[in-house]
Every structure is written in C-alpha cells, then in structure tokens.
Image (cartoon, coloured by chain):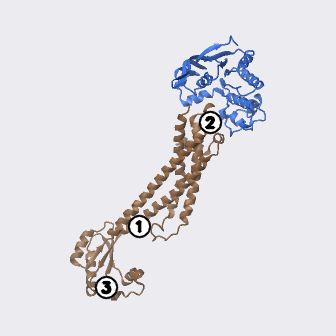
Amino acid sequence: MNVRLNTLMHFIAGDAQADRVVPPTGYTARLTVFAAASMAFLAVFALALSLATGRVADRWGEALAKSSTIRINAPVDQMDAQVLAVMEILATTPGIKDARPLGDDEQRALLEPWFGPDLPLDQLPIPKLIEVVEDSDGFDADGLRARLAGEAPGAILDDHTRWREPLVRAAKRLRALGFVAIVLIAALSGVVITLAASAALAANEQVIRVLRLVGARDKYIAHAFVRRYTLRALGGASVGTVLGGLAILLMPSAGDQGNFLTGLGFEGWQWLWPLLIPPLAALVAFVATRQTAQTVLQEKR
Amino acid sequence: MIELEQVSYGYGDRTLLSDISMKLAPGSFHFLTGPSGAGKTTLIKLCYAELIASQGRVSLFDQDAQRMTRDDVAKARRRIGVVHQDCQFLDHLSVAENVSLPLTVSGRSLENPSELDDLLAWVGLTGQSDAKPPELSGGERQRAALARAVVMSPDVILADEPTGNIDWDMSLRLLKLLVELNKMGKTVLIATHDMNLIRSAKAQIQARVLRISNRQLQLAGADL
C-alpha cells in the first residue's frame, strides 16, 4: 500500500528533468485539453440528468406506493351514506394506515386552477374524494375494489398505477440512459485521448529514438508521456466541470415541484458528484496513454 | 564486450550482411570501412541491438542480444556510447541537457556539476552549454554528440561516420578525442570511408581495420 502511495506521489510530483525530454507544445496538447474539457462539461449534464430523473422517479415511486384516491359518484342525497360505507370498508381493510375524505376547501383548491376561486361546490355534482394512505405492507387493491363494488357501488379506487407507473418507468430509464451517457462519454474521452497520445508518440518518434539510444527504459519514456497527458486531461476536465457546474447553477429552477427539465441539477450533497469527474478523466487518460505508449514502444527496438 | 558470431542480416529477399564474425575486445580500437551502402551502419546498429541479426549470435556484455529484454537492452546501451553522423539530438533541449541526457534517463547525476563543464571544455564547447543544437555548427554538433556518448563513462564507443559532415581539421580534432578515450581504456569502433582519417589514426595508435565487401567482413590494413 505504501509502495503504491509512494508511486502515486512520485507520479504526481513528477521529475522536472524527465518532464522536459518530451517537447512541451503541439496540437495534440490542445486537442487533449479541449476534449477533456468538453467531455467533462457533457458529463456534468449527463450526471445532472441522471440525478434529476432519479429524484423524480423516487418521488413518483414513493407517491405511487403510499397514496391512492377513492372517488365517489353518487346522487347528493346518497353521498354521505356512501362516504360512510367506504370509510367503514377502509377501516377494516388491512394495509391502510390512514383514510380521510377531502374537505370542501381542499376539493375547491384542487379545482381552482381550472374553474377559478368562487366555485359553488355545494351546487355542483362534484364527486367526493377520499385520500387513502397505506402502511408499509400495502393493501390488496383488487380485493378492495371488489368490496367497494359490492358495498358502495359509486366508489372507484384509483391507486394511480395507470398513469404513475409508466412515468416512473420512463424516469428510471432516463436515469439509466444518463449513466449510459456518462459511460459513453468516458469511453469517447479514452478514444480521443488515445488518438491524441498516438499522434503525439508518432510526432515524437525522433525523441523516442534518441531516448532509447541513450539507454532510456520504456517505463521512463512512457512515464514522460503518460504523466503529461494525465495532467492535461485533469486540467481540461477541471475546467469543463467548473463550466458545467456554473451552467447548471444558472439554469432556471421550479423548485421541488418542478418537472425533471426545470429541476435539472444537483441538490445538497449531490454537488459532490461532479468533483469525481476530473479525477476520473485523469484516470481514463492515464490508462489510455499508458496502453498506447506501451503498444507504440513495443514496435520500436 | 561485443561479439558477433556468424551473423547475417537482411530483410525480405535482400541480404545486407552475411556470415560476419567480429569481436570488440576491451580497450581495442577498430575502424570499419567499406563503400557507401555496404552495411557499415547496419553492423553498428547490430552492435547496440537496434537491429537483431537474422542469423548468428550477437553478444553484448556476454548476453545474447536476441534474448535480451527491452530493459536489458536499455541497460546495455548505458555502457555503449553511440555517435551518429546526424547526431540525433533533442532540439528543444540545450547542449548541456542533451549531453547529460544519458544521466537523466538513468536517474543519475554527476557527482560535481562542474564535471559537465569540464566535459564540454574537453570537446571544445565551453560557453555553448545553453545553446540549442540547431545553433551549433556541424563540427560542434559532432563534438557535443561525442560528449553525450561518453558522459556515462561507457565501456564501448561506437561512432558511425562521425566525420562525414565536417572539415578535415575538425575531423582530426574529433579523432584526437576518440584516441584519448581509447588510451583511457575505452573500446572504440569507428565506421568511416575516410581512408585519410584511418591512416592518421594508425599513425597514433594500434587500430584494426575491418572492411565490408560483398556483404562479408574482411580484415584490411595491408593496402592502407
């Protein structure tokens, strides 16, 4: 462990003289930094998308699992009896933690966005709503429907499954797609950095020949290239991550109630996730460049 | 030190060297001569394992070159100083950095930094340590290459046409340095087609002259 730590510290600290043996400039340097910055910027968005859709999926999933609504359509003179009957059924149904009829004010508030604030609720044939909150075990929705059909024919159980489940599935898939995008971004970064490193090694063939001529080991030559490309990727990815984070910060927010588009971003500790992007980009660059350097050097005597 | 036993080298259907046997004993001085394209550079490259023989055996410090790992080759090259006609410098580094490159890549340093100045003075490059190789003349570049070849105090010095691009006076000056190294016990092999240079050397030291002719290596000398 200590040996690995020492190796890592030596890699980070570097060797000023060894760093100088490879010419410092060239288009491959700019290509690597630009690619790392761009990929990190995109990775921040992919990460934000994954986390935001994850939150939406969790929120919807939680609501799906915990609440249902019973809607009672009955003539006004039978409404109270039906409500009473439904409440008695719910009281004896296992898996229900709480049930309560929504008050007139609550129903008015629900309808207000469509009908305005002065809705004469008592004069309209509006169904009565009962909010049902289940416990951790949940209830048998089919059994409850059967009992309601027998004892309160005007009552219809809406456990939200019809419209919430596809949305939650879609949100979960979107989250998975976000992670796939991150993996693809990492792979693409590796490809771009591999190409840049290959180009750099090809462009520095004379340097490699001279180094081999004077007795440099492959490890020494590879180290000079690997360290340089790793640091370039780290620097570029840091810039890209900061820019991506700023862009996320500047996006309009609709708070917790917003959908995943307006809620795209990080919350609380989730802001720590983007900090992983620069070291991961550096790791990708390290592996890609080392592999490339070893392959190229093996071809030379 | 370096020994070739019945070595052949070629690529495709073309054979460049055939059945070559040669031994560079410690402290010996050899010239390798022959017409352009005869295979002098190829033979030099076989001597520091940049090329691997198609047939036969090349030994570097008692190790079979064909079986040496890449790290073994790197280690062996630290005991062999090579001077090429085109010098092969890293143009972005200064003369001092180029000369000390063998030390840098092997993780060593001179005991006293003034030794580098002494070395540059020995090859007549005092005051040129901060210059970049493209700023040097042909003769200065050759002498800088020689300084780089000897900075690790190698056992063997291989010089491939070291006087190819420089005038006669500078050639004699370079030869003098190589002769001094040989007198210090270093093994020297110089590939050249410059017969005057060989005659000048033979006047100063005992040197064997090998000639490549028709892909074969022959001992020359009587006709010089």
For residue A272, above or below residue A88: above
Residue at label 1?
Answer: A59
In-front residue for pair A291/A149: A291
Residue hosting label 2: A206
Residue placed at 71% from the left, 36% from the top? B133
Rendering coords of residue B211 (x, y %):
64, 17
Q: Is residue B106 visible?
A: no
| Contact (Cβ within 8 Å) of mark 2 with mark 1 | no
In the image, farthest residue toward the left: A150
Q: Position of residue A71 (x, y in %)?
A: 30, 78
Element type at mark 2: helix
Task: Spot the blue chain and give its letter.
Answer: B
Element class at badge 3: loop
Is label 1 or label 3 in front? 3
Quadrant for the N terminus of chain B, please: top right
Callout 2: residue from which chain? A
What amino acid is labelled 3 in the image? Pro
Distance of label 1 from label 3 (alpha carbons): 33 Å
Mark 2 or mark 1, whichever is nearer to me: 2
Residue at figure coordinates x 78%, y 35% from the top left: B127
Tell me the amino acid under the disc marked 1: Arg
Q: Which residue is mark 3?
A: A125
Rendered hue of chain A is: brown
